[in-house]
């Protein structure tokens, strides 16, 4: 004979006791709730940790990094099993009025939907964690797709909960979305734009985490630390963080320095301004004297006639850069003369540094410029600079000397 309810087993043990029905109901309800708690603790503390530890032993380097995701996953699986056990056995365990049992059923179903949503979210996070360990994950980020998947999961869960509370089919709820489509698009405008932008960014590899980007419209100049569905966070070089809407990287222009970091060198492009009154022609004796001072000039080949000091200086600077160990000789290297300007004659040094690190790069181009400025006087060249401040100082010194003489 099948047992319809757990009280059929409890009542024979309580036969003859006062308030037999009340004690039987209390015992049945206690057994039911304690059983649910036992299922949760047993699976959460014993079953799933054992499985997790066993799997981790096969690949400690990879699965060990996913411990946090696995802990959330096993906890939510234990909660879901407990909820399923409650919904499966509550009619044969709990003793309560019909409306209370129906309330328990509705609450249990809602909790099961919520836990299922969080469980799927944990699975997505776990899949994202596994994907992040792949070699090409940095070049093709999928964080935006992960966030969209979780968003859609909770939207579906919300529809199911609403349909459960209203006792209507989910299709009935979905049919009402047509009337509020415009409002939905308005509310989730940034999310929809971010979704499209995230797909384009991932497909075209426009930006990845760790890239150095420069977005002048938002004052961002630094390293990308987070690439989300709605926002991109950039840690600037002054350690401030700038938040940029993801879709702005598609609709507006920005500069990504990744190509420079992956290239053979970082460009040095600096110019010196020469006083054009110091440009003169040189005789053979002056050229020979400069060749003795700067051996690099012996290898510059035949010089055009007449020889100028600025032409000889350009050839010396180029020869100096070609022998520099920190300059990439496989890239473009030249010293060129730009169009004369009202503030002097620009001589530009164009080359590429082998080391692309910021500090080394700045020191290298500063050392090159220091050397060029120091050697200009050997070629009888003068730099062009504003001297009004110096003239003002000299004028004050002359006035002081006159007053002292008087």
Image: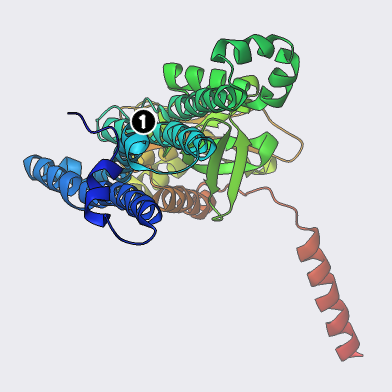
Give the image quarter of residue 73: top left
Q: Quadrant of residue 303?
A: top left
* Nearer to us in this view, 5 or 123: 5
- Comparing 405 with 349, the one in front is 349
Q: Is residue 272 above or below residue 18?
A: above
Quadrant where the C terminus is found in the figure: bottom right
Is 343 positioned to the left or the right of 255 in the image? Answer: right
Please provide percent x and percent y for residue 385: 70, 51
Residue at 79 percent of width and 71 percent of height = 394
Q: Nearer the viewer, residue 371 or 211?
A: 211
- Say which residue label 1 marks: 124
Q: Compared with residue 40, is residue 267 higher up or lower down, i.e. above or below?
A: above
Quadrant for the N terminus, please.
Answer: top left
Q: Is residue 381 left or right of residue 180?
A: left
Q: Whole-percent x and y of residue 404?
A: 86, 90
Residue 133 visible to the viewer? yes
Tell me where residue 219 appears, x and y as whole percent.
66, 42
Residue at the location (85% across, 75% down)? Answer: 396
Image location of residue 138, percent across then percent down: 34, 32
Task: Check the image and name the residue furthest to the front.
Answer: 16
Q: Locate residue 60 relative to residue 405 in the image: left or right.
A: left
Image quadrant in which you'd find residue 233 = top right
Image height of 138 relative to 202, above or below: below
Considering the numbered disc 1 on the image, is that residue within a helix, a strand or a loop? helix
Give the image's coloring scheme.
rainbow
- The front one of 114 and 60 is 114
At a point 67% along the width and 38% down the height, the residue shown is: 218
**Quick check: 176 left or right of 74?**
right
């Amino acid at each position: 004979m099948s047992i319809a309810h757990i009280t059929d087993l409890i009542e024979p043990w309580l036969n003859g006791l006062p308030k037999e029905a009340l004690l039987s109901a209390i015992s049945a309800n206690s057994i039911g709730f304690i059983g649910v708690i036992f299922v949760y603790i047993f699976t959460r503390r014993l079953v799933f940790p054992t499985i997790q530890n066993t799997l981790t032993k096969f690949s400690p380097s990879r699965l060990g990094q996913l411990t946090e995701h696995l802990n959330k996953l096993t906890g939510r699986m234990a909660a879901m099993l407990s909820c399923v056990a409650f919904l499966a056995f509550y009619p044969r365990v709990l003793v309560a009025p019909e409306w209370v049992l129906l309330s328990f059923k509705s609450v249990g179903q809602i909790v099961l939907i919520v836990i299922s949503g969080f469980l799927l979210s944990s699975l997505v996070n776990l899949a994202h964690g596994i994907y992040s360990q792949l070699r090409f994950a940095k070049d093709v980020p999928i964080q935006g797709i992960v966030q969209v998947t979780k968003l859609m999961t909770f939207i579906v869960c919300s529809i199911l909960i609403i349909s459960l509370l209203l006792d209507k089919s989910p299709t009935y709820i979905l049919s009402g979305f047509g009337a509020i489509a415009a409002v939905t698009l308005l509310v989730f405008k940034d999310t929809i734009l971010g979704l499209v932008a995230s797909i384009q960014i991932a497909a075209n590899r426009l930006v990845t985490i760790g890239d150095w980007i420069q977005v002048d419209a938002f004052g961002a100049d630094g390293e990308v630390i987070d690439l989300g569905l709605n926002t991109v966070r950039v840690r600037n070089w002054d350690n401030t963080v700038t938040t940029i809407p993801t879709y702005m990287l598609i609709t507006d222009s920005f500069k990504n320095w990744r190509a420079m970091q992956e290239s053979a060198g970082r460009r040095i492009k600096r110019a010196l301004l020469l006083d054009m009154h110091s440009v003169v022609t040189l005789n053979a004796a002056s050229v020979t004297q400069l060749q003795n001072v700067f051996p690099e000039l012996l290898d510059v080949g035949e010089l055009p006639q007449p020889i100028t000091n600025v032409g000889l200086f350009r050839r010396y600077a180029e020869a100096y850069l070609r022998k520099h160990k920190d300059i990439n000789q496989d890239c473009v290297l030249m010293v060129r003369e730009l169009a004369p300007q009202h503030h002097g004659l620009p001589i530009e040094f164009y080359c590429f540094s082998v080391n692309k690190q910021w500090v080394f790069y700045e020191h290298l181009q500063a050392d090159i410029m220091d050397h060029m400025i120091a050697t200009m006087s050997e070629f009888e060249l003068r730099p062009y600079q504003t001297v009004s401040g110096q003239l003002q100082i000299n004028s004050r010194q002359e006035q002081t000397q006159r007053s002292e003489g008087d």
